[in-house]
Amino acid sequence: MRTRQRDRDIQPPRAPWSEIRPGLWIGGHYWFDPAGEMRPVVVEDEFDLVLSLFARPGHGPAPGVEHHLGEMPDAPLGSRELARVRELAALAADAVRGGRTTLVRCHSGYNRSGLVAAETLRLLGHGIPEAVGLVRRGRSPWALNNEVFVQYLEVGLDIAALLTGLEEPV
């Protein structure tokens, strides 16, 4: 299974998940070990809250762990998907404020999870450039390589959802 498009020169994830700030982690469903072998990431009970933007059977989390699913593409999002990003970021921000460990995950832990994590950081008081920088420093320089997602953050998810909604069929 490939994790990135062939035309991208992006390094695969080298850890199952990475801490972005105390209590907030991002990760994926796959990572590559030091030998270059792809390994599945199975979440058990390491986190109090897991937010999944991509899902595969058998990847957890364990029963009893609060889990919210919001599958979406690593591509331009519609207004409903952007609303879901805002909802998930609010859940994550509330959890982090409450001292709960939170994992936001997608396929590789770069774009979709980076978008939700950066919006979570904004809700926790960080500016967008700082939030994007924290995600990239914490996870990978290749995190948030989907420039459309960075633009959503820069313009604000509410405005992005309104503008995207203008293009959607009624």
Image (cartoon, rainbow, N blue to C red):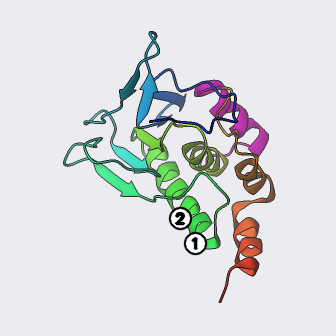
Instruction: Say which residue appears at 54% left-offset and 44% top-offset.
Output: 113
Q: Secondary structure at mark 1?
A: helix
Which residue was labeled with disc 1? 80
Q: Quadrant of residue 146?
A: top right
Whether residue 126 appears in magenta in the rendering, the answer is yes
Horizontally, is 93 left or right of 76 in the view? left
Task: Specify whether residue 145 is in view.
Answer: yes
* Three-letter code, disc 2: Arg
User: Do the CB atoms of the residues marked 2 and 1 lie less than 8 Å apart?
Assistant: yes
Residue of label 2: 84
- Secondary structure under tag 2 reads helix
Q: Residue at x 67, y 30 (%)?
A: 142
Quadrant of residue 5 in the image? top right
Q: At 44% from the left edge and 50% from the top edge, which residue is drawn?
A: 54
* Relative to 157, residue 122 above or below: above
Q: Which residues are magenta?
A: 124-140
Instruction: Measuring from the top left, give residue 119's x and y in whole percent.
Output: 63, 50
